[in-house]
Amino acid sequence: MNRQEPAAMDDEVADQAAHWFLCNREGDLSAAQRIEFMAWMKRSPEHIRAYLHVLHVHRQVGAVMVAYGQEQGDRAAQPELPATAKVVPLFAVPVPVPRAVVASRSRRPLWRRVAAVACCLLLVAGLVPWLMPREQMLIAGHGQLREVVLADRTQVRLNADSRLRVNIGWFSRRVELLSGEATFDIAADHRPFEVQVGDLRIRDIGTVFDVSRRLQSTRIGVVSGEVEVWTAGSGQRRLAQLPAGKVVQVDHRSHAVQPLEIPMSMLLDWQQRRVSFRDERLDEVAAAFNRHNQVQVRLTDDAARAARLSGSLEAHRVAALQAFLQRDARFVIRREADTVWVSSR
């Protein structure tokens, strides 16, 4: 969902760019002015384009004025022919021009060029670090829920045992969910926002959605707005376009997209430190509890891992999960120190 750039530059931004150009031209900026100028430039790529546009126009006007001045000087240097002259010379005799005039003509265009180059160098030196994406690693520890506001004002909530790599630049916003689960409240911006999970890419601008990197699949739920799910790498293809209220899981191997009938409130229960599951595999349920507890749930066989359950429990109450499983005739439960072993009958 890309937005088109405006056809014409905003008048207010253009006026601000002209103001800063004149300030730089008049002399060295004060320390406070330099800070204000750099803050204005960093605020938006439109400000950079506007300032470069002013420099470009200034150079064009300067070149025209110089050419016009030289033309007028050449005309003045031509000797005036008498009215009765019957022969017009093909080449006029050159009239010496005082050195002071020549120096004056050459000095002003050179000054303009030097000033423009100096401004461009200042601009490049100060903004290159901001134009390049800056990498940031966000980590929520074992049993920890974490909320972070990114540089673009996007709000991120991380579930326990989650890691997120963030790259926010002037022209793109990319994050990679390395493990765990995160909810994104995307700040509206002209730059697309992209979440990578393994070999999947989720593209969006200005919405709220939840992404969970699971054992066999990636679960995606859209709270508001709309997202697109694509495969990553060469030969990209769109797998799904998800509106608000839609929840799907995408298989890691086949990329098959399966709709899930999960209420949005249940999807976000983890933010209240609850593990809610509907027709969920036991290995996924155990992994969700293991994020929050020192006591770990271990499954001993494939039948136990693939068994499906529905329920809702507090994330830190492993004892409640143990009691829940003991009431199910399909399982044999035993506790050893900090491990709950679950086997199928």
Image (tube, rainbow, N blue to C red):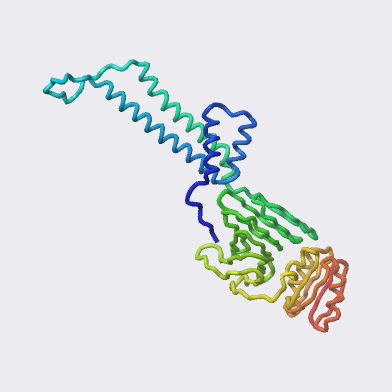
For the view shown, which residue lies furthest in the front direction? Answer: 83
Q: Is residue 296 left or right of residue 44?
A: right
Q: Where's residue 294, x and y in %?
A: 83, 63
* Residue 171 versus residue 311 in the image, above or below: above
Quarter of the picture holding the N terminus? bottom right
Q: Residue at x 34, y 29 (%)?
A: 68
Q: Where's residue 304, x and y in %?
A: 76, 78
* Residue 11 versus residue 105 in the image, above or below: below
Q: Where's residue 225, x and y in %?
A: 63, 64
Count the labels in the image.
0
Which quadrant of the view contains residue 157?
A: bottom right
Q: Is residue 231 left or right of residue 289?
A: left
Q: Residue at x 45, y 26 (%)?
A: 111
* Residue 142 versus residue 267 in the image, above or below: above
Q: Where's residue 117, x and y in %?
A: 48, 33
Quarter of the picture holding the C terminus? bottom right
Which quadrant of the view contains residue 264?
A: bottom right
Q: Is residue 58 left or right of residue 171?
A: left
Q: Residue at x 53, y 27 (%)?
A: 26
For the view shown, which residue lies furthest in the left direction? Answer: 86
Relative depth, front residue between 107 and 199: 107
Which quadrant of the view contains residue 28?
A: top right
